[in-house]
Amino acid sequence: MNTAIWQIVLIDGLFLFLVVGIGLWFRVWLAREKERLDGCLELLEAQHARLERVSGRLQTVCRVLELTGQQEVPGVAAKLEESKPMTPSSIVQQEESFKQAWNMLIEGVEPGEVVRRLDIGTAEVELMSRMLHYRRQG
């Protein structure tokens, strides 16, 4: 009987050690997961702040464009009336120009040079250049 009691005590002790070991492992795992998630949260907060700044800039530009659109500028109405709707072939040509511009920017050609070579808008090329810049950073 004495041996049976010692066996029960030993088994209970081993079980307690096992439970404590699993508990400690779980605690360490939770701490590591918390650190990882905190790091991800910091990155998301930084990206959110950048997006807020970009959003603010875009809203400012939209307001400026709305104000300038409300003011009558000589010749703008005439240019708008003269502009023709884009045909499917001109859309394809424009898409091809944008693809060429994107490839040129990837090769390192300056945006001003891309505008001159392909005869497309400066704003579009600048936007593509910024997108490429942010893509390389991220």
Image: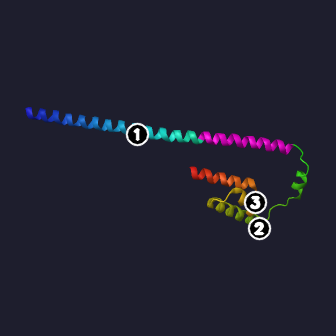
Up/down of 1 relative to 112, above or below: above
What amino acid is labelled 1 in the image?
A: Arg
- Percent x, y for residue 93? 74, 66
Mark identifier at residue 120: 3
Ranked by sequence position, the earlier of labels 1 and 2 is 1
Which residue is at the front of the view, 61 or 85? 61
Dot 1: few (<14), some (14–19), or many (≥20) neighbours within 10 Å? few
Q: Is residue 1 visible?
A: no
- Residue under label 1, please give it: 32
Residue name at image x 89 percent, y 47 percent: 73
Residue 56 sits inside the magenta stretch? yes
Q: Which residues are magenta?
A: 48-70
Front residue (pair 126, 40): 126
Residue 128 position within the rendered picture, expressed as x and y whole percent measured from the top left:
67, 55
First reached walking from the N terminus: tag 2 or tag 3: 2
For marks 3 and 1, the one nearer the N-term is: 1
Indicate the quadrant containing the N terminus: top left, top right, bottom left or bottom right.
top left
The mark closer to the camera, 2 or 3, is 3
Q: Secondary structure at mark 2?
A: helix
How far apart are the alpha carbons under marks 2 and 3?
16 Å
6, above or below 134, in the image: above
In three-dimensional space, the C-alpha distance between marks 3 and 1, rounded to whole angstroms, equals 51 Å
* Residue labelled with disc 2: 89
Q: Which amino acid lies under the numbered mark 3 shown in the image of this protein?
A: Ile
- Name the residue at 75% across, 55% down: 122
Residue 82: % across, % down? 89, 58
Observer-side mark, 3 or 1, equals 3
- The question of residue 23 being in magenta is answered with no
For mark 1, give the secondary structure: helix
Residue 115 or 3: which is nearer the viewer? 115
Relative placement, left or right, of 70 versus 56 is right
